[in-house]
Image (cartoon, rainbow, N blue to C red):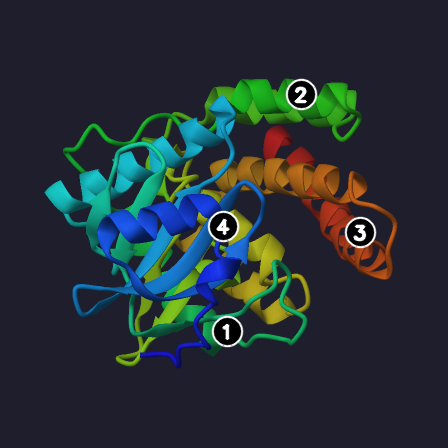
Amino acid sequence: MPPTPTPTPPESLPAELATVAAQLGLRDITVLRHSGKAVVCTAGLAGRPVVVKVLLAAGEPWLARLRHEIRIYRAFAREPPPVRVPALIHTDGRRVLVLERLDARPLGTDRYPGRGLTVAQIEPGLTAVRRLAAWHPLSSGFGPAWDYPGRVSRYHAAGYLTDADRDAARRLLARCDHRPQIGHGDPLSSNLLLTADGGCALVDWEHAGPFLPGFDLAMLHTLLGARTPAIRARIDQIVAGTRIEEPFTLNLVLVLARELRIHHELPASPLRTERLALLGSAWATARDRLQGAAQS
């Protein structure tokens, strides 16, 4: 089990978390993240280590996102996936989620890891997302994740896709008759937990659902491969071997467009400048890839 930080003083807990703690009997609470929208903490519950997420925001988008994640964990409880995930321990179905705390450590903590990762380090994560993509659950807990035509139109209207980009993306989308695959949807390095047996567990499932093939690979290509060409080469090898070049390329372009939007909306800072430079280089390559795939 990873070392537990010093527990947060009771008087420093958000009121919503303090109420949940009293109701459930949580002990030794340590706040890990407090975004203003939700609070995530570790705690003890009936002698076992758990992770607790409590929604603070009252807006419908935030409620919908946590309800979606709760549905995913309930689906996993009925039909376990082929990857390691935390067990669902308790939920009120709306604002509170209590999960098993896994004996594992995150691959990283940053959206774009500052230290260069190796192919060997990310291979367990690649294996996990590929196993997930090959899974065809019977459960109905996985609703649509991305509106692909809507994303293409929205990123074009915002200026991230040119007319030629939009037309090429639409041609690829029309040709993508692949069966959707279950994707994690947000495989950040912090959501890839490396286990002692050399495997990888996946956490934070609020963006999970059916995607065109290669979505998680496109995310890893963008985020973890930003500073390591060998990682991108390894993912490209997987894409070629599984013959999903067209849907992967569409996913890659839309993921990069979203990352550009996110970072253009951030306040000016050295970090923003650095990441936009990384994204600019990847974007130029992805646009060439999009046009080539659409014309083939």
**Label 3 secondary element:** helix
For the residue carrying disc 4, how many other residues have a C-alpha within 10 Å: few (<14), some (14-19), or many (20+)?
A: some
**Label 4 secondary element:** loop
Residue 107 locus on image (x, y percent): 48, 71
Residue 253 locus on image (x, y percent): 63, 38
Amino acid type for the residue under numbered disc 4? Pro
Amino acid type for the residue under numbered disc 3? Leu
**Label 2 secondary element:** helix
Q: How far apart are labels 4 and 1 at the CA level?
A: 40 Å
Amino acid type for the residue under numbered disc 1? Val
Q: How far apart are labels 2 and 1 at the CA level?
A: 34 Å
Which tag, 4 or 1, sits closer to the chain's start?
A: 4
Query: What mark, if any, has residue 119 been given in the picture?
Result: 1
Which tag, 4 or 2, sits closer to the chain's start?
A: 4
Q: Is residue 293 visible?
A: yes
Residue furthest left in the image: 78
Which tag, 2 or 3, sits closer to the chain's start?
A: 2
Query: Which residue position is annotated with label 2?
Result: 154
Q: Nearer the viewer, residue 167 or 136?
A: 136
Query: What mark, if any, has residue 276 been given in the picture?
Result: 3
Q: How far apart are labels 4 and 2 at the CA level?
A: 37 Å
Residue 233 left/right relative to 51: right
The quarter in which the N terminus is drawn is: bottom left
Q: Nearer the viewer, residue 188 or 268?
A: 268
Amino acid type for the residue under numbered disc 2? Arg
Between circles 4 and 2, the one closer to the viewer is 4
147 vs 19: above or below: above
Query: Which residue position is annotated with label 4?
Result: 14
Q: Residue at x 19, y 52 (%)?
A: 89
**Label 1 secondary element:** helix
